Amino acid sequence: MADLEFLARQGFAPDAGPPKGLPDEIPITLTINGERRALHVRPWTTLLDLLREDLSLYGTKKGCDHGQCGACTVLLDGERINSCLALAVTKDGSELTTVEGLAGKDGTLHPMQEAFIEHDAFQCGYCTPGQICSAVGLLKEGHAKTREEIREMMSGNLCRCGAYTNIVDAIEDVLAKGAAK
Amino acid sequence: MQQTSMHETHVGSPRNRVDGRLKVTGEARYAAEYTAPDLAVGYVVSGAIARGRIRSVDTKAAMAVPGVIQVFTHQNRPRTAWRAKAYQDEVAPPGTPFRPLYDDKILYSGQPIALVVAEDFEIARYAASLVRVTYETEPHETDLGKLREKAYKPPKTRSGMAPPPPRGDAEAAIGAAPFKVDESYRIAIEHHNPMEMHASTVVWEGDGKITVYDKIQGVQNTQSYITHVFGLSNDDVRVLSPFVGGAFGSGLRPQYQLFLAVMAALELQRSVRVMLERDQMFTFTYRPDALQEMAIGANPDATLQAIRHDAIGCTSRFEDYQESVVSWSAMMYRCDNVTTTYKLAQIDTYTPGDMRAPGAPTGMFALESAMDELSYKLQIDPLQLRLRNYAETEGGGGKPFTSKELRAAYQLGAERFGWSRRNPVPRSMKEGRELIGWGMASGMWEAMMEKTSARATLTIDGRLEVGTATADIGTGTYTILTQIAADALGLPMEKVTARIGDSSLPMSPVEGGSWTAASAGSAVHVACNAVRETLFKYARGMDASPLANADIGRVAFRGGRMELMADPSRYVTIQDTMRAGGVDRIEAEETAAPSRINQLRYAAYTHSAIFAEVRVDEELGRVRVTRIVDAVAAGKILNPKTARSQILGGVVFGIGMALTEESMMDHNLGRFMNHNIAEYHVPVNADIHDIEVIFVEEHEDKINPLGVKGLGEIGIVGTAAAIANAVYHATGKRIRHLPITVDKIIGEKEAA
Ligand code: FES
Ligand code: FES
């Protein structure tokens, strides 16, 4: 897939004929960080682009746009997903939590956010929102009990800065305190 | 020197990152995350051939898409500087920089050939797929292995990159040495792949003025690039880069998305953002491969007699990129006969560039592998071999070191690792189906400092702001500058704000080379000291001042007060002092520069001793790095917490280099095949097990007022070699070509 797209961009795509205008926008409703929103989206818009480009919710990051890095991880109805792989129109009626929605209204950080700061579980911070959402999702799943399992089940979230051991420390800490939501 | 030693200082203590909250809440903004009411989005069309020219570009279909504003190509691009030199940025290597959309020439595969600008991202991306291009191809060459005969000595040396002069007679000494290793080594081309893709948002402010949010390691480098290329003045261009989502060197030079975004914004007179796709992250700079020949000769008593290290690095056809690959071999150990050569060969790619410790892990992989091979020939413990040839001065006969506690690093690292329990025989340790191996290596990196300015402003509300135009690419710059400033005036860190990543701040070079803590840190330190002295003058001049006759060296600045060390009950507050002096702010701008005399007299390096344990499943060819101990001697550690993270990051980079990272070139197409991060394997969490970081006590008082040496690079330097050596110990297979992938483990024969 990636390569077809790459070739297409280089002018090797089969001739698509003249464009016939843009696809229509479709109405959907999403609850984002507790707020219900009525939106109009084109079918080609991913959840990730909807968040970043249309709603200026830049906390969710784009690191590949191909489901390879986890930077775009959000919680969809409580489960972690790669928002770059989800078309917004297919998620009508869903509830979405992004990194912006993890802290309390009063600014109290989520225990996972606290633990990330305390354990220095990031450097540049670009993978961090995805790591944190993923970690929150992981604990909710309830499968990871050991460091080994945390490592394995957090391996969809790349960190080029190499903060992995600290990320595992942070998650283990939250797990031990039983503070995960 | 400042006298805060009576109390716990921030410097030297583990502190959480001051930007931590912004990063965990998603509020930290990166280059593509700024917007403007009139924002348009640009999407880059990448070229398909490796060499030749564009015969035609058809943009009609793209232009017909509703919402497309313009398609820029070499045919309709606005005029920019005509002199190639204008495109040379602060850290450009010798040569003629790549100029996007300059003409119809194709210099490398993936070269940007058009920019589609549209009302939104999806439209731009779709329209980009409709641009039709035909080419006239010319033969290309991307295979360094075929270019040995064409290698040349770069006519113009990149500053500081000349290989050291030869000493003694290496050839004769190698010939005479009873024990020797003479082998070839190679690494793989690697791409930086920071998690944030390169991006620039250019906000059109009207009147020919722009504000640029760029992914860059030096805002002033971007600013001067823009002013030179587009003929603007510094007042027209403000560059901001408060957060950088990793860079590792890819953000040292302004990259092509910046040029394209600025060009479009100026031409369209509206705001434009361009963010690259992940595959386009493989269409500019990278860590070059090198053909390396390494020979070492030793006497039976394990003393080194000779070292010869020759390298041919790849570069582009348009610039002579150079890095320090071979110089380490002349400096690391005591040896009288050393010769090194460093040449280049041109391939049809973009110019390679600095990537985390440029040159060092490449050269040290060869040197430290060869040392390991030699240890087996001599039947001496690899650590003993290094100690036997320990250099007390640079290379054993050169300049003295400003400080060097590598011996302590070897010792502490070995103790923590349990090295003394190692059975030297390869394949002697096994558990279940896995062979276990222990290997070690040394690392070194130059401790540099660059001239940098900073401003410090103390206001009557008791707040201190410090600023310099450097960057924080995840290194912790914000945090250490805050610590340094807080200590200088005895304030809590919450009262201090560090501002960086803004071209309007005092002058700073790009953030790189591990020099930022030393450079920006020293600049902030001297600026704060100037504020401190002014403040103290006011304090002495106050009516009935308890400090009237005091010497600044006998006064402690703490808790927002200045108090006599001998009698802390005699004090004045900062606020009262400023009020009495009739000022509501005290500001100082100062410049810190390295001591030229010390630079001439001494050699300054960070060092490391790195120990690795691997487990190898020989049947599957799988290697796991289960344990690393990295003992680092790097002078003063400003913040043990963020410092440790720096080393962890470097080690993880090294594990990637050793085992998985490889940009694979299809020499037929002249293109990197695995241009995505599913096939270019950056280590993931499951690849990383225990990493222990030790900072060795090292007193450093010559290179800068803080005694800091920098940590961004040293973590990676010896890591790949230590792992390769451990793989040998586990399996008896000597792999001299990184990365050590499954096929090599399975395919390689055991060494005789
Ligand atoms: S951006 Fe979604 S996985 Fe990388
Ligand atoms: S913190 Fe930089 S990529 Fe993870």
Image: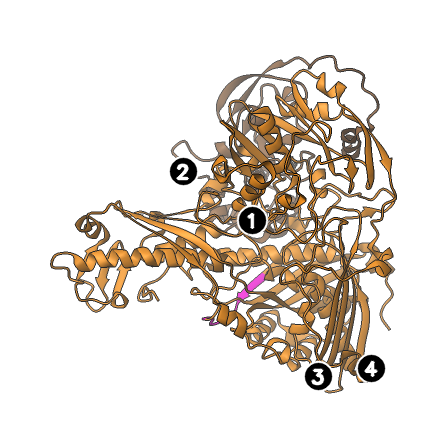
Chain colours: A brown, B orange
Q: Are marks 4 and 2 in contact (CB under 8 Å)?
A: no
* Label 1 vs 2, first from the N-terminus: 2
The 10 Å Cα crowd at callout 3, few under 14, some 14 to 19, many 20 or more, is: some
Label 2 amino acid? Thr
Query: What is the quadrant of the N terminus of chain A in the image?
Result: top right
Label 1 amino acid? Ile
Q: How far apart are the alpha carbons under marks 1 and 3?
A: 44 Å
For residue A167, the mark is 1
SS at mark 3 in the image: loop
SS at mark 1 in the image: helix
For the record, the magenta segment spans: B692-701
Quadrant hosting residue B307: bottom right
Please check the rendered image and state whether residue B693 is part of the magenta-colored stretch, yes or no: yes
Q: Are marks 1 and 2 in contact (CB under 8 Å)?
A: no
- Name the residue at 44% across, 39% down: A109
Label 3 amino acid? Thr
Q: How far apart are the alpha carbons under marks 1 and 2?
A: 20 Å
Determine if marks 4 and 1 fall on one subunit: no
* Label 3 vs 4, first from the N-terminus: 4
Foreground residue, B637 or B50?
A: B50
The 10 Å Cα crowd at callout 4, few under 14, some 14 to 19, many 20 or more, is: few
Chain letter of the residue beneath label 2 in the structure image: A
Determine if marks 1 and 3 fall on one subunit: no
The 10 Å Cα crowd at callout 1, few under 14, some 14 to 19, many 20 or more, is: many
The residue wearing badge 3 is: B303
Which callout, 4 or 1, points to the residue nearer the camera?
4
Residue B328 coordinates in the image, percent (x, y): 67, 69
